Amino acid sequence: MTIQKKISNLFRAHYSNNALSIIKIQGDASSRQYFRVTGTHGSAIACYDPAFETATPDTYPFLLLHSLLSRHAIPVPALITADSEYGLLLLEDCGDLLLQNVFGSPLEHTVPDRYREIIDILIQLQSLNGQNNQIPFSISFDHEKLMFEFDFFIKHGLLDYFSPVFERQSVGRLRHEFETIAEILVKPKHFVLNHRDFHSRNILIYNEKPVIIDFQDARMGLPQYDAVSLIRDSYVKLSPSLTKELKEYHYNALYNHGLTTMSFDEYLFYFDIMAFQRNIKAIGTFCYQTMVKKNSAFQHSIAPTLSYLADYINVRKELKTAGKILQTLLDDSAR
């Protein structure tokens, strides 16, 4: 049975519709597929996830996170129905205006206020607590996870996409530096819940309010992780003044809610180290999509993400050696 037929069956079982329009929409860099389903009673978003077919509702991360976030009034699309046999979720259709799309539109003047509003939502999320033996509180950005992301970049970025300009014999030295950087970032006493992909393509503007999507990979980590994803975004570039303001806004909110004991200088230190890791991770994903999946949609985001790295390398001595090893990439992206 095709995915479209499964969607049709599920939608009709819920809405008793006859005439349906099922249109595939652009998804993320995962195996999930998304469709807008429209019938006489309105529309919904169908998500097909092959991982859901082998899970149960009480072990499937998306449903666990949806329940958690919904209970705490964090704005996410409503769940209409779910069917693990089909691997399908039917979700509220919150439109297609992404935060990314606000840039360059007549709404661009709202960007500073919008980002402050989104950071307020982020603080709500980062305030959540739960049992440390249950998802998402049982998983974190530990050393293994951070190194998996660094190694992914080495494999698909340095040894594949950038192989013409990167000296292969430098991999060992660079990986040693990555190990050291990962150690800096594993500070469980500072960990809070993170969305994990909190950027402008995972935030919709619906009824003039932000709605958070793609939250199923949430895990514990430094609060700077999501702040980096939002403020040092691969898809949009904020002005230096707004970047500075939003770092301060996030820190003050964390401090005022009792979510951090860091000083502001310490917050900025971890922000830069975390930003380096997060941007490296993103570049690895973009290179993988480009070279392995033959998906060119992410290739144009590689150079803008690379352009961020010098900002951290130039101010943090802990990144100097890694920066020197990566210099040929930085030079190449600047051309």
Image (cartoon, rainbow, N blue to C red):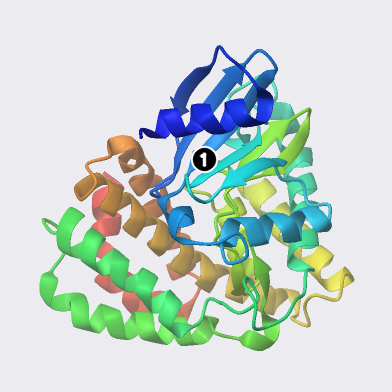
Question: What is the quadrant of the C terminus in the image?
Answer: top left
Question: What is the quadrant of the N terminus in the image?
Answer: top left
Residue ID at (59%, 25%): 12
> Mark 1 packing: few (<14 Cα in 10 Å), some, or many (20+)?
many
Q: Which residue is mark 1?
A: 47
What type is the residue that disc 1 sits on?
Cys
Residue ID at (73%, 57%): 67
Residue ID at (13%, 68%): 167
**Residue 299 seen anywhere in this rendered image of the structure:** yes
- Vertical placement of residue 97 versus 50, above or below: above
- Vertical placement of residue 124 versus 146, above or below: above
**Residue 103 seen anywhere in this rendered image of the structure:** no
Please give the count of numbered marks on the rendered protein. Answer: 1
Q: Position of residue 168 (x, y in %)?
A: 12, 71
Residue ID at (68%, 88%): 189
Q: Position of residue 260 (x, y in %)?
A: 77, 78
Q: Position of residue 17 (x, y in %)?
A: 62, 18
Q: Quadrant of residue 148?
A: bottom left
* Foreground pick, 59 / 277: 59
